[in-house]
């Protein structure tokens, strides 16, 4: 399954690369006229529509960090026309490889609404609207220099004619955007924007890294936890008593034949997998509908409140019930393999009071991510966890008599998921925390309370020593999670402090001795037969800061950097003469760009990197540069 998902993501990434940036436009801008013609003394609303080409996004009007370049619109209007207000859409919170927390961005196509008012004595025959959109385009690895895209349009007044003077410009020959908006109004003029950097026709080394991100330890851990969650849900009061009944039903349908018994179990699990996978895909597709709303604190608080309400149901404060007719429909047995498949498709309805809150929480998590592959994969793995006991017991049907009897211990298991849902509530409130340390300590507090309560305070007691041992193990697991959350918060806070206060040039706190880019220093390095490393960066570049705090700060990086001349080239202002010269000379498309030069003064092009790279990859490239190998 893992290989299939990886292959699919790799193909998706390849398809995305084929439509990726080739040095041409990153966005297109067009002006959409008002629904009614302009009229003296009246207000009219126009729209500036921005289409962002994959694999890029642009920062929203209110970016997540103050040093990021916001998207903004500037108008040039004739006398007698003034701007009443400009409404920017909310950004969508997205997590990228180079960011610790989600960023507020625009993707696909967005519209900015501007309300204009004509004075009552406006004497012109037409209204000419000129303007530009200031923006910064980034992909999942790197950022291009801030840029502008112009637009313009002419409109006759209502008494003369109601259509625009200038027809819509033909569409630019660029990759199709990931999403388009309905166009009820007539577009006036479309003008794509390209990065104003020399040498922009060379192929850029920017691409989607979906397959790589799937291999990340965090995502694999998420899959593992969801699978274990599916297994644990079998121990809840709504599911556990059904296991022997369901296996007995399989036995009656199969006539005692082992192969048929296993077939029924597989069809049952297949039904569960289909139902839950469809739920995951739907959640991922619809996630974009409320993704932008997640930028607003009231929505985040509402979602967290829902998570807490679901958690309270797991603590038996109340019970979530489904309509009786649905329960009767799902619980009705049907003969044959189709009947078994139908049982699997509908088992979630029967078990909803116990597994429903956890499934709803997972649906919200997937909707927040908006990733179809993630949604399908997580819910498929959840179904595998739920169904594994049925397959195992179908293979070894004699083992069903060894299952522990149903009892109050299942209520104790159910409360574990209550604490998981509370932790998910804190997760959704993460953007509202003032800093990573506060968020990490809050999560650690939830884990600490869960460990103490589940191990020692929760009143459920079982016969024998087994439950007592399991209680202590679960408490220990929560304590371990507490330490992990607290250490992660402390580490993130330290990284943030280094990023905000650490100097980029001179003697860095990591011990790396940096020098500002200088051609004379470069010539001296070639004369001394010493290799050179150049970090092209900008102050508005978040991946550049991540390189400083995560890669260059490693002690191993400081050690090996002593054998290089370490230069930093500041491309913050793309219009400066030095920036134009360096981007032309080194064909820099975006920042960060990492360039390695051997002891003979020649660049090693195969070692060049665009975007964030981790410590291990950086050290590997530095070692190759020492021996002058591509």
Image: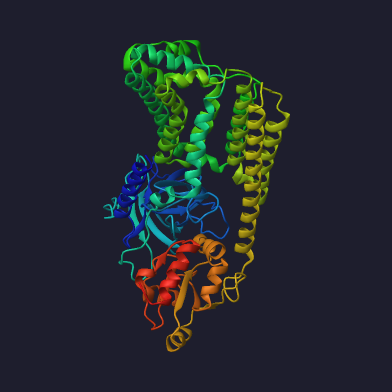
Task: Measuring from the top left, give residue 2's x and y in whole percent.
Answer: 38, 42
Q: Nearer the viewer, residue 213 or 185?
A: 213
Q: Residue furthest right?
A: 457
Say if residue 512 shows up in the picture: yes
Q: Quadrant of the N terminus?
A: top left
Q: Is residue 239 in view?
A: no
Left or right position of 378 against 168: right
Question: Along the line of sight, which residue is nearer the eye, 74 or 526?
Answer: 526
Eyeballing the image, is 117 above or below 560?
A: above
Q: Nearer the viewer, residue 390 or 156?
A: 390
Q: Position of residue 452 (x, y in %)?
A: 71, 35
Front-most of residues 67 and 433: 433
Please tell me which residue is depicted at 52% across the width and 20% down the height of the picture.
402
Q: Is residue 1 above or below residue 62?
A: above
Quadrant housing the C terminus? bottom left
Residue 355 appears left or right of 395: right
**Number of dots carrying numbers:** 0
| Residue 184 percent coordinates (x, y) | 35, 39
| Residue at 42% from the left image edge and 41% from the top image edge | 371
Task: Indicate the position of residue 85 as horizontal and vertical percent values.
Answer: 52, 48
């Amino acid at each position: 399954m893992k290989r299939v998902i990886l292959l699919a993501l790799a193909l998706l990434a390849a398809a995305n690369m084929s439509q990726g940036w080739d040095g041409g436009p990153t966005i297109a801008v067009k002006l959409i006229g008002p629904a009614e013609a302009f009229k003296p003394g009246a207000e009219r609303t126009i729209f500036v529509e921005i289409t962002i080409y994959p694999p890029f996004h642009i920062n929203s009007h209110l970016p997540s960090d103050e040093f990021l370049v916001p998207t903004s619109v500037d108008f040039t209007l004739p006398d007698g026309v003034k701007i009443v207000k400009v409404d920017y859409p909310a950004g969508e919170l997205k997590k990228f490889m180079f960011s610790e927390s989600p960023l507020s961005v625009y993707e696909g196509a967005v519209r900015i609404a501007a309300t204009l008012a004509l004075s009552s004595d406006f004497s012109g025959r037409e209204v000419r609207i000129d303007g530009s959109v200031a923006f910064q385009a980034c992909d999942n690895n790197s950022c291009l220099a801030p840029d502008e895209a112009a637009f313009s349009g002419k409109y006759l007044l209502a008494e003369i004619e109601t259509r625009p003077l200038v027809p819509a410009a033909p569409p630019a020959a660029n990759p199709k955007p990931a999403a388009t908006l309905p166009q009820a109004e007539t577009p006036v003029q479309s003008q794509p924007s390209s990065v104003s950097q020399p040498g922009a026709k060379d192929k850029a080394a920017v691409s989607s890294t979906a397959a790589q991100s799937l291999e990340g330890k965090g995502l694999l851990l998420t899959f593992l936890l969801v699978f274990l969650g599916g297994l644990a849900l079998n121990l809840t009061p709504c599911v556990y008593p059904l296991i022997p009944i369901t296996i007995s039903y399989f036995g009656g349908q199969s006539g005692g034949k082992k192969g048929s018994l296993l077939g029924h179990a597989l069809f049952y699990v297949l039904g569960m997998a289909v139902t839950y996978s469809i739920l995951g895909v739907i959640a991922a597709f619809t996630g974009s509908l409320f993704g932008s709303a997640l930028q607003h604190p009231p929505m985040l608080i509402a979602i967290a409140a829902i998570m807490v309400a679901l958690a309270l149901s797991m603590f038996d404060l109340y019970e979530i019930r489904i309509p009786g007719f649905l329960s009767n429909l799902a619980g009705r047995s049907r003969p044959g393999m189709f009947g078994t498949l139908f049982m699997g498709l509908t088992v979630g309805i029967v078990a909803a009071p116990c597994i429903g809150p956890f499934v709803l929480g997972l649906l919200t998590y997937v909707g927040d991510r908006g990733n179809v592959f993630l949604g399908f994969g997580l819910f498929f793995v959840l179904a595998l966890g739920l169904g594994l006991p049925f397959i195992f017991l179908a293979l070894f049907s004699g083992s069903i008599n060894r299952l522990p009897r149903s009892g109050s211990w299942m209520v104790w298991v159910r409360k574990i998921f209550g604490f998981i849902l509370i932790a998910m509530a804190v997760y959704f409130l993460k953007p509202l925390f003032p800093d990573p340390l506060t968020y990490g300590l809050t999560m650690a507090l939830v884990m600490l309370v869960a460990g103490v309560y589940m191990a020692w305070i929760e009143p459920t007691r079982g016969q024998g020593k087994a439950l007592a041992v399991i209680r202590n193990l679960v408490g220990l697991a929560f304590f371990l999670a507490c330490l992990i959350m607290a250490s992660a918060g402390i580490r993130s806070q330290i990284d943030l402090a280094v990023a905000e206060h650490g100097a980029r040039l001179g003697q860095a706190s990591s011990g790396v001795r940096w020098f500002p880019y200088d051609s004379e220093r470069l010539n001296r390095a070639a004369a001394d037969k010493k290799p050179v490393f150049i970090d092209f960066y900008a102050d508005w570049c978040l991946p550049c800061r991540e390189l400083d705090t995560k890669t260059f700060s490693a002690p191993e990086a400081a050690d090996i950097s002593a054998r290089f001349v370490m230069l930093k080239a500041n491309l913050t202002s793309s219009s400066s003469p030095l920036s134009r010269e360096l981007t032309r000379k080194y064909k820099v498309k975006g920042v960060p760009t990492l360039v390695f030069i051997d002891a003979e003064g020649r660049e090693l092009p195969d070692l060049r990197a665009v975007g964030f790279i981790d410590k291990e990859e950086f050290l590997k490239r530095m070692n190759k540069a020492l021996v002058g190998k591509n």
